[in-house]
Image: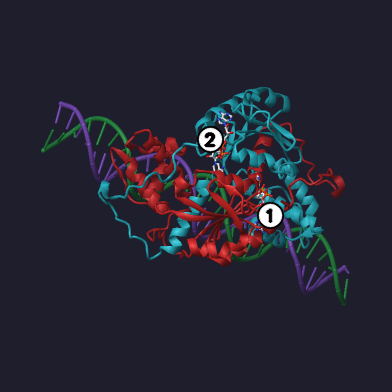
Chain colours: A cyan, B red, C green, D purple
Amino acid sequence: MTRASSRRPGPPTRTERGIPEATVARLPVYLRALTALSDSGIATASSEDLATAAGVNSAKLRKDLSYLGSYGTRGVGYDVEYLRYQIAREIGVTQDWAVVIVGIGNLGHALANYSGFGTRGFRIVALLDADPTLVGERIGDMEVRDFAQLEEIVEADRVSIGVITTPAGPAQDVCDRLVAAGVTSILNFAPVVLSVPDGVDIRKVDLSIELQILAYHEQRKSGEAALPQVPELPALNGMPDLPSVGGGVGA
Amino acid sequence: MTRASSRRPGPPTRTERGIPEATVARLPVYLRALTALSDSGIATASSEDLATAAGVNSAKLRKDLSYLGSYGTRGVGYDVEYLRYQIAREIGVTQDWAVVIVGIGNLGHALANYSGFGTRGFRIVALLDADPTLVGERIGDMEVRDFAQLEEIVEADRVSIGVITTPAGPAQDVCDRLVAAGVTSILNFAPVVLSVPDGVDIRKVDLSIELQILAYHEQRKSGEAALPQVPELPALNGMPDLPSVGGGVGA
DNA sequence: AGGAGCTTGTGAACGTGAGAACAAAATCGG
DNA sequence: CCGATTTTGTTCTCACGTTCACAAGCTCCT
Ligand SMILES: NC(=O)c1ccc[n+]([C@@H]2O[C@H](COP(=O)([O-])OP(=O)(O)OC[C@H]3O[C@@H](n4cnc5c(N)ncnc54)[C@H](O)[C@@H]3O)[C@@H](O)[C@H]2O)c1
Ligand SMILES: NC(=O)c1ccc[n+]([C@@H]2O[C@H](COP(=O)([O-])OP(=O)(O)OC[C@H]3O[C@@H](n4cnc5c(N)ncnc54)[C@H](O)[C@@H]3O)[C@@H](O)[C@H]2O)c1
C-alpha cells in the first residue's frame, strides 16, 4: 500500500476518522458474514455470533466495529441489516465503482466471467488487451477492446480502479498508462513490484507468494527434526545447482 | 493462518529458528528480486539495491535477512546466487511440492494453464472436479480427473498442498475432504471462511476483498470534504434500500 | 601496514495490532 | 420499579513489526 499517510506524531489522534489498516482489511469479511446471516433470515447477531461467522475473535470484532461508531445495542447485539449498511457505506460499496481489466489472457478471462463483482459494488466497464487478435472477442455481455482506447474509457466512465492481468514484462508500462489516464487504484496480478506516484493505491495478488508461504510452513511441519541441518556457511560452490527456482520475472 | 504457535512468554526467544510471519511473507519477494538481478547478470547487490528491487526499505530488508543468518559481506553486499539459494532453501522451494487443484471452472482453468508455478518449486499433479462433463477434458498436458480420486492421488503423489477454486457452497466440504486425505496446506479462492483443524495451514485469496479495500481508500480520496457527512444515527428505516451489496456467499 | 570508505547486522525507540478484562448500558422477569 | 442478566464499548497490557542509527567488519588504496 502506497498511501501518503500524514499522521502527525502527537497523541493517538484517532478522531480524524482514521480507521486502522488492519481493520479496513477485515471490514469486507464482516460485510460478507452479515450478508450471509441476513440471507438466513437472521435479524440480530451478537459480536460472538458475528465473530464466529467471520473467523475472528469477538473482542477484535467489537473493537473494529467501534471505529465506525456505536452501532450495537448493549445486552442485545447488532441489527444485521443496519450494521451491514453502515459497513458498506464506510467501505464505499453503496455506490458502485467502475473497473477496467487490462490483459485478457487466462486470468483476465476468468475475472471477466466472474459474476461476483457486480453484486459487491463493482462494475466492470471494459476489458482491454493489446493483442489485436483478441480485440472484438465477446465474453459474457462484454467485448474485448483495444488497450489504446484506455484514456477515453477512463474518462467517459469515470474509472478509478484498474486491474492488471498482463504478463510481468509490460505491467509497469500498463500501470503508468493507467495512472496517466487518471486511475488512482490498481490491483496487480503480475509478479512484479510496480511503482506508482503518491496518491495512487496499489495492491497485489500473488499466487506464487501465497504458495511459497504455505511451503515454508509445510517444510517446518515435516522437517522439524529431519531438516538437512543447514550447512551454516558452505563454500559458494557448496550449493546444488538450483536451475531457476524462485521464478524469474518472465510471463 | 491457523498455526499452533507454541511460543512461551519468556524473553525474546528467537533462537528457535522462528522467523516472524511478516518476514516470511516478504522472503518470496526477495527471492523474485534476486532472480531478476541474477537474470540481468548482476552478481552482487547491496541491501539498498535489493530493497529497491523488492519495493521495501533497506533496514527492513537487512533485518529480514538477518533472521536467516549472516549471508552478506560488510562493505560489499550480498552474493546474488548464494543469497538466492539460501532463501530458497529456507522457504523450502529447493524441493518441489505436489499440488492439487479442486474445481476446474473459470479460475481453475486459468491456474491450470499457468506456467509460472512449475518454475517456482510447485508441481501440479492433478486437476479435480466433481462435474462429470468436465472430467476427461485436457488442459495443457493434464487431464481433469474425478474428485472422487482425491484420496488415492494425495497418497500416491504425497500431495501436501491443495488449492480450492470451487464455488463457496461446497468449499468447506472440499476442504474437509482434502484435510481427511492428508493435505496440510490449503490455498482458498472461495469467498468463505474455512475452518480447519490445528496443524493445517490455510491462506485465502479474495479478490472482492482486495477491491473493497481499494474502494475504501478511493472513497476517502475523492470524498475528503465532499462526504455525505454521515447521518450519525439515522432511524433504522433511514437507510437506502441497498439491494444486495456486500455479496452473499453464493458462487 | 594503516587508514578511508562502504555496507552489514543489530540494539533501541517507536508505532501498530491483538486480546483480556471490565464498567456501562440495555433488556427482561418479577 | 429493581435487580439479574446479557452484551457492548473501551481501557490496559503485551506482543509484534518498522525504522533509525551506529558499531563492527570488510575491501581497497596509498
Ligand atoms: N494464470 C494464472 O493462473 C496466474 C497465476 C499467477 C500469476 N499470474 C500472473 O497473471 C498475469 C496474467 O496471467 P495469464 O495467465 O492470464 O497470462 P496470459 O499470457 O494468458 O495473458 C496476458 C494477456 O495480456 C495481454 N497483454 C500483453 N501485453 C499487454 C499490454 N502491453 N497491454 C495490454 N495487454 C497486454 C496479452 O495479449 C494477453 O492476452 C501474469 O503476469 C501472470 O504471471 C497468472
Ligand atoms: N472467476 C473469478 O475471477 C473469481 C474471482 C473471485 C473469486 N472467485 C471465486 O473462486 C471460485 C471459483 O470461481 P470460478 O469462476 O472458477 O467458478 P466456476 O463456477 O467457474 O467453477 C467452479 C468449479 O468447481 C466445480 N465444483 C463444484 N462443486 C465441486 C465439488 N464439490 N468438488 C469438486 N469440484 C466442484 C464445478 O464443477 C466448477 O467446475 C468461486 O468460489 C468464486 O467465488 C472467482
Q: Is residue B62 above or below residue A197?
A: below
Q: Are marks 1 and 2 in contact (CB under 8 Å)?
A: no
Calculate the distance from the C-alpha at mark 1 to the C-alpha at mark 2: 28 Å
Q: Which residue is mark 1?
A: B168
Q: Secondary structure at mark 1?
A: helix
Q: Find ligand 1 in the image and state its quadrant.
A: top right
Q: Secondary structure at mark 2?
A: loop
**What residue type is disc 2 on?**
Pro
Q: 10 Å neighbourhood of mark 2: few (<14), some, or many (≥20)?
A: some
Residue displayed at 50% across by 60% down: B159
Cβ of mark 1 under 8 A from ligand 2: yes
Name the quadrant of the N terminus of chain A.
top right
Q: Is residue B159 above or below residue A163?
A: below
Residue A26 is left or right of residue B44, and the answer is right
Q: Which residue is mark 2?
A: A167
**What residue type is disc 1 on?**
Ala
Residue B96 is left or right of residue B241, and the answer is left
